[in-house]
């Protein structure tokens, strides 16, 4: 969200100082989910710089280009910009499914969990589903890469059975190249035998 506010601030500056502003505008600084906050600075027609660097601080810019500081609250921002906030793309969600040694078979419990994920995909504005297969480093690298593809494919196939359109899905597979937990070469590791599903 901070990036959105910064982008709007930059665009606003370009419009404001070209003399094309026809109505009052407000720039509000939004925090990221981790609570981090950036900084936005705007220079008015007199050359004075106005800076906001705390969550929910705002700059009101009049039609004449006059800038005044304002402090909003989280509640007031949610009410005032409810339509805009609702239209923002959702943060990607990630789900992990782990596999047995030398296996690409999903267990019954995992199939039930996949049904839940499939329902979330169908009920929300998910536009892309990425099934990413991985393996541990035990055994032959090329074999493990093929196994990681099979894991990713099995998960995607089950999601399709549960009503997720195939047009939303793509497969990626990395063998043992991107371990969740680093281990010595050729060592089995249950945490690395996985598929990650990313919803965007």
Image (cartoon, rainbow, N blue to C red):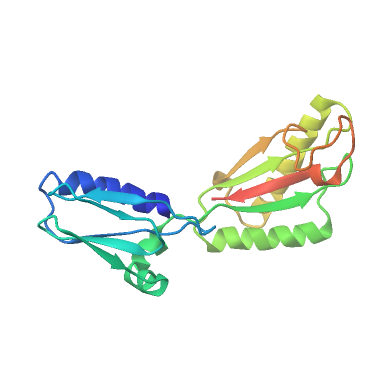
Is residue 117 rendered to the left or right of residue 167? right
Is residue 135 rendered to the left or right of residue 171? right
Q: Residue 1 or 196: which is nearer the viewer?
A: 1
Position of residue 144 relative to residue 199, above or below, is above
The quadrant in which residue 130 appears is top right
For the image, the number of numbered tags is 0
Is residue 138 rendered to the left or right of residue 65? right
Residue, x 17% and y 61% (percent of image)?
Answer: 24
Residue, x 84% and y 36% (percent of image)?
Answer: 183
The quadrant in which residue 167 appears is top right
Q: Position of residue 190 (x, y in %)?
A: 85, 46
Q: Position of residue 131 (x, y in %)?
A: 66, 44
The answer to whether residue 43 is visible is yes
Instruction: Look at the image and tell me in which quarter the N terminus lies.
Output: bottom left
Position of residue 115 relative to residue 46, above or below, is below
Residue, x 78% and y 57% (percent of image)?
Answer: 110
Q: Residue 50 or 25: which is nearer the viewer?
A: 50
Q: Residue 178 or 170: which is nearer the viewer?
A: 178
Q: Position of residue 10 (x, y in %)?
A: 28, 45
Is residue 46 rendered to the left or right of residue 173? left
Q: Residue 115 or 51: which is nearer the viewer?
A: 51
The quadrant in which residue 145 appears is top right
Instruction: Kindly give the residue lying farthest to the front in the view shown.
Output: 48
Q: Position of residue 114 (x, y in %)?
A: 71, 57
Residue, x 66% and y 57% (percent of image)?
Answer: 162
């Amino acid at each position: 969200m901070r990036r959105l506010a910064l982008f709007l601030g930059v665009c606003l500056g370009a419009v404001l100082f070209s003399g094309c502003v026809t109505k009052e505008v407000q720039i509000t600084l939004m925090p990221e989910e981790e609570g981090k906050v950036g900084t936005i600075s705007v220079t008015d027609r007199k050359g004075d710089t106005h800076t906001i660097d705390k969550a929910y601080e705002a700059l009101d810019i009049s039609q004449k280009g006059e800038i005044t500081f304002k402090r909003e609250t989280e509640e007031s921002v949610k009410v005032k910009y409810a339509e805009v906030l609702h239209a923002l793309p959702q943060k990607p969600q990630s789900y992990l499914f782990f596999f047995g040694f030398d296996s690409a078979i999903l267990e019954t419990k995992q199939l039930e969990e996949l049904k839940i994920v499939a329902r979330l995909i169908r009920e929300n504005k998910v536009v892309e589903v990425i099934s990413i297969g991985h393996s541990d480093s035990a055994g032959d690298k090329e074999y493990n890469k093929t196994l990681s593809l099979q894991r990713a494919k099995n998960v995607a196939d089950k999601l399709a059975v549960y009503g997720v359109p195939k047009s939303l899905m793509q497969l990626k597979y990395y063998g043992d190249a991107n371990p969740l937990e680093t281990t010595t070469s050729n060592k089995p590791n249950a945490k690395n035998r996985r598929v990650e599903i990313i919803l965007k």
